[in-house]
Image (spheres, rainbow, N blue to C red):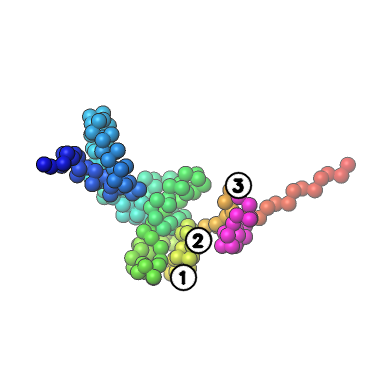
Amino acid sequence: MKPQDYPPAVRQLMTQLTRLPGTGRRSAERLALWLLQNGSSDALPLAQAISAAVETTGTCPQCGFFAAKGELCTACSDPTRDASQICVVEQATDVLPIERSGFFRGLYHCLGGKLSPLDGVMPEDLAVHKLLERVKNHPDCEVILAVGSDVEGEATALFLAEQLGKLPCRVSRLAQGMPAGAGLAQADAITVMRALQGRTHLDKPAAPQQD
Ligand SMILES: [Zn+2]
């Protein structure tokens, strides 16, 4: 006697769902059953959306951010952007937090990682050559290094600054300030050092008028 089980297609769906980040067998089973119960209203539109996103999304040939296949991303194709500023980030997913801050009007460059010789990540594994080519085509631009402040991020920033130093561009490093709402007691030494290095000048308040 065979034990009762889900049909093969459902078992296959559960197997695929367990491949999603943070989804164990029990979660996959719950999700699969929910999808089956909401077939036409939710599951099929979801399946179509996944298929469309995977088939039509690629990376921007200029900056490496997400874009429709074979096309420039929204920022790179926007003529009102300040092309003289290139903000270098580790991953494409680092772009949106900067973008949402609303303070940056320039373009981006996604490296696709950070230097980590111990993990076998060398300069040729990152979009470094592409960055240098971009800078060569935009003399006098400013390159803002917005890579992380951990050991690998610092090594990446140092390497890029050295490479970019040979080109006619300005290089700056994103100041890593104190986290909003947190005091010095909660900050580690690198954060404090970065906050000090990235300090901004404050105008002295005008002396009170003497009558
Ligand atoms: Zn782009």
| Label 3: few (<14), some (14–19) or many (≥20) C-alpha neighbours in 10 Å | few
Residue type at tag 2: Ser
- Quick check: is 118 in the magenta stretch? no
Position above or below: 76 against 166: above
Question: Which mark is on residue 162?
Answer: 1
Outermost residue toward the left in this view: 1
> Residue 187, located in which quarter of the rendered image?
bottom right
Q: 25 or 157, which lies in front? A: 25
**The N terminus lies in quadrant:** top left
Marks 1/3: CA–CA distance: 35 Å
Q: Which one is closest to the eye, mark 3 or mark 2?
A: 3
Report whether the residue tagged 2 is closer than 8 Å to ligand 1. Answer: no
Residue type at tag 3: Gly
Q: Please state the extent of the stretch shown in magenta in the rendering.
A: 181-199
Q: Which residue position is annotated with label 2?
A: 149
Q: Which residue position is annotated with label 3?
A: 181
Outermost residue toward the right in this view: 211
| Mark earlier in primary sequence (2, 1) | 2
Q: Is residue 200 left or right of residue 35?
A: right
Image x and y of residue 170, in percent: 50, 63
Marks 2/1: CA–CA distance: 17 Å
Marks 3/2: CA–CA distance: 20 Å
| Label 1: few (<14), some (14–19) or many (≥20) C-alpha neighbours in 10 Å | few
Q: 57 or 21, which lies in front? A: 21
Q: Which one is closest to the eye, mark 2 or mark 1?
A: 2
Image x and y of residue 58, in percent: 28, 50
Residue 95 makes an appearance in the image: yes
SS assignment for the magenta stretch, majority: helix
Residue type at tag 1: Glu
